[in-house]
Amino acid sequence: VLNRCFFLAIMVEINLALYGKATHSDLVENPWSADGHASNAIDGNHDSHYDHGSCTATTMQNDPWWRLDLLDKYIHIGNSLLNNGNSNPLAGKISSIPGGRSLTFKWKKGIPGRYINVVIPGSNRLLTLCEVEVYGYPAPDGENMNIYDVDLNSMTLIKVINQKRDKNSKTAEIQ
C-alpha cells in the first residue's frame, strides 16, 4: 500500500496596497476635505484627475515623500522607518510619468520589506500620486517556508498612476 500525502498551496497575488496604511510628508488641501490625502493613492480608484478626489498631493517642499505601510513583511521594498523610510535601499527610479499615464516596475526576485516610499529629492518639489498598486506574496519565514514552498522568484510590481496636475514631472525614487 502506497501512502502519500500531498499539500498544495495556491498563492494568488492581490493588490496589497488596498489593505495598507499610507502617509506623506505634507497635505496640500484642507485636512477635512477628501482632496490630497495620502490614502487616496491606495483607494482602488484609477481616476487620474486630481479634482475628482482620488489623488494624493503634497505642498511645494523639499524632498516630498509618500509612504505605504503594508502592515506585514512581504516580498517587497524596505523594512526601516529611519529618515521616514527614505533610507531604505533604492529599488527603482521614476524618470518621469506623463500625466494620466502609468509606470510599472517588475522584479524577477522579490525584495523583502514592509514599507514602500516614493520620494522626489530636491528643493521646491511637488509629489502627486493617483494610484499605487503593490502585488506580491507574504514573505515566508521560519516553519512557514517549509510548509508553503513559495516561489521566491515571483514577480513583484508597483504601478504608479500619475495625474495631470504636476506638469513639471521630476525624477522620483522608490525605496
Image (tube, rainbow, N blue to C red):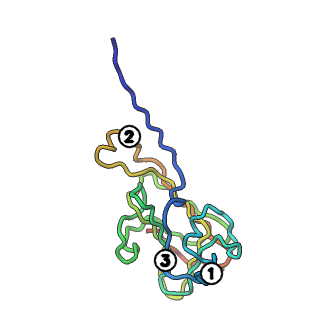
Residue 78 relative to residue 156: left or right: left
- Above/below status of 16 relative to 171: above
* Number of numbered discs: 3
Earlier residue among tags 2 and 3: 3
Q: Nearer the viewer, mark 3 or mark 1?
A: 3
What residue did someone put label 3 on? Answer: 65
Q: Tell me the residue at 50%/57% (across/down).
A: 16
User: How far apart, in angstroms, are the residues tagged by discs 1 and 2?
Assistant: 46 Å
Residue 22 relative to residue 2: left or right: right
Question: Looking at this view, is 150 or 7 the one in front?
Answer: 7
Q: Residues within 10 Å of mark 1 (few under 14, many from 20)?
A: few
Please tell me whether mark 1 sits on a helix, a strand or a loop. loop
What residue did someone put label 1 on? Answer: 168
Please tell me whether mark 3 sits on a helix, a strand or a loop. strand
User: How far apart, in angstroms, are the residues tagged by discs 2 and 3?
Assistant: 35 Å
What residue did someone put label 2 on? Answer: 148
